[in-house]
Amino acid sequence: MHRTVIERELELKLILSPERSVPVPARLGYRRDDPFAVHVTFHIGSDHPVHWTFARELLVEGVFRPCGHGDVRVWPTKVAGRGVVLMALSSPGGDALLEAPAAQVSSWLERTLRVVPPGSEAEQLGIDDGLAELLAPTPGCHDELRLRDPWPSDESADGE
């Protein structure tokens, strides 16, 4: 499998209050070899970037309707007439509410969905092939172990 990486840099807004926000440079990342996840790096180009990883499916759904619970929640809304996606992130270090331009997030997500369509993520990992190999019988190997009852009888030979 060849390695495919889809990235997009964009400026998010960290919402501090209804009247105040600060710009946060960010990078969205998706890797074919990690098909279930999206990676978001905040403060790119700084000495202390912040990395978050969560389910791609959560972001895909969050572009259309509120979803998620716990550490990551995503929902669409309108701000000054333009579509945005809000991401609420919670960690032991604090909480953040970030605003992303919906069109840019959607465009990037569409690219990830073309590379790995929904429902085909497991194929990218080779899970089915790996399980088939793991569960395939090996001729002649340990035949005597397969024929034995794996759970001994409750009755002991000496009648105890």
Image (cartoon, rainbow, N blue to C red):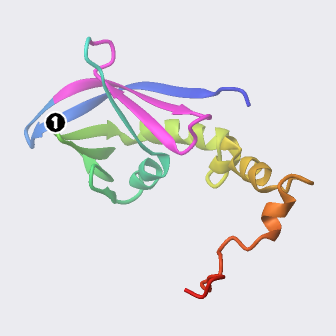
Badge 1 amino acid: Gly
Residue shown at the point (78%, 54%) measured from the top left: 132
Which of the image's four quarters has the N terminus? top right
- The crowd level at tag 1 (other Cα within 10 Å; few <14, some 14-19, many 20+) is few
Identify the residue under disc 1: 93
Asked if the stretch drawn in magenta spans residue 33, the answer is yes
Secondary structure, magenta segment, majority class: strand
Residue shown at the point (68%, 48%) measured from the top left: 127
Residue shown at the point (62%, 82%) measured from the top left: 156
Q: Which residues are magenta?
A: 22-46
Q: Is residue 57 left or right of residue 112?
A: left
Q: Is residue 138 above or below residue 160?
A: above
Asked if residue 81 can be seen in this view, the reply is: no
Which of the image's four quarters has the C terminus? bottom right
Image location of residue 74, percent across then percent down: 33, 51
Residue shown at the point (42%, 52%) measured from the top left: 58
Q: Is residue 2 above or below residue 48?
A: below
Q: Is residue 45 above or below residue 41?
A: above
Image location of residue 117, percent across then percent down: 65, 48
Quadrant in which residue 6 is drawn:
top right
Image location of residue 105, percent across then percent down: 43, 38
Q: Is residue 55 left or right of residue 72?
A: right
- Foreground of the two, 85 or 7: 7
Asked if residue 15 can be seen in this view, the reply is: yes
Q: Is residue 120 left or right of residue 16?
A: right
Secondary structure beneath dot 1 equals: loop
Quadrant in which residue 150 is drawn:
bottom right
Asked if the stretch drawn in magenta spans residue 14, the answer is no
Image location of residue 84, percent across then percent down: 32, 44
Q: Is residue 40 above or below residue 82?
A: above
As drawn, which residue projects farthest toward the front? 158
